[in-house]
Amino acid sequence: KKSNCKCSETEELKNEAASLSVAGISKTLKAPMKIVWFNQTQVLRFFTIVDDETLIKKYIETVIRRTFGTNDAMKLAKPISKQ
């Protein structure tokens, strides 16, 4: 609450080379997934036991679309329109 629900504003992540990890079972992949965000780099790392490169690429693309895309660009593998 102190960071207004913004991960980048938390005290722990203001430190140089800090990271935030979120882990659990992905409903989409039906498998364990861990996502690590590295502060000050805008780098995300994805860890999973799923051995399907195409599926993982679509999963990561969906994460990117949900963060940076528009509401109509939310489906897997649907091109983001250039507006």
Image (cartoon, grey):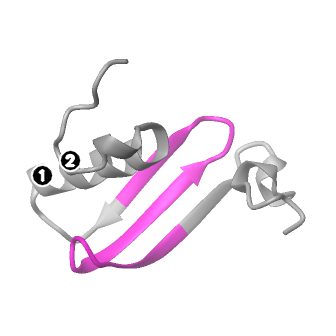
Image quadrant containing the N terminus: bottom right
Question: Which circle marks residue 44 in the picture?
Answer: none
50 to 71, vertically: above or below: below
Q: Picture quarter containing residue 6?
A: bottom right
Q: Is residue 1 above or below residue 66?
A: below
Q: Count residues near mark 1 (Cα–Cα under 10 Å), then give few for <14, some for 14-19, many for 20+.
A: few
| Circle 1/circle 2 CB separation < 8 Å | yes
- Badge 1 marks a residue whose secondary structure is helix
Mark 2, other Cα within 10 Å: few <14 / some 14–19 / many ≥20: few
Residue at mark 1 to residue at mark 2: CA–CA distance: 6 Å
Relative depth, front residue between 26 and 49: 26
Q: Residue at x 70, y 45 (%)?
A: 17
Give the secondary structure at mark 2: helix
Q: Residue furthest top?
A: 83
- Provide the residue designation for mark 2: 57
The answer to which image quadrant residue 10 occupies is bottom right
Looking at the picture, which amino acid does disc 2 mark? Lys
- The reply to whether the magenta stretch includes residue 40 is yes
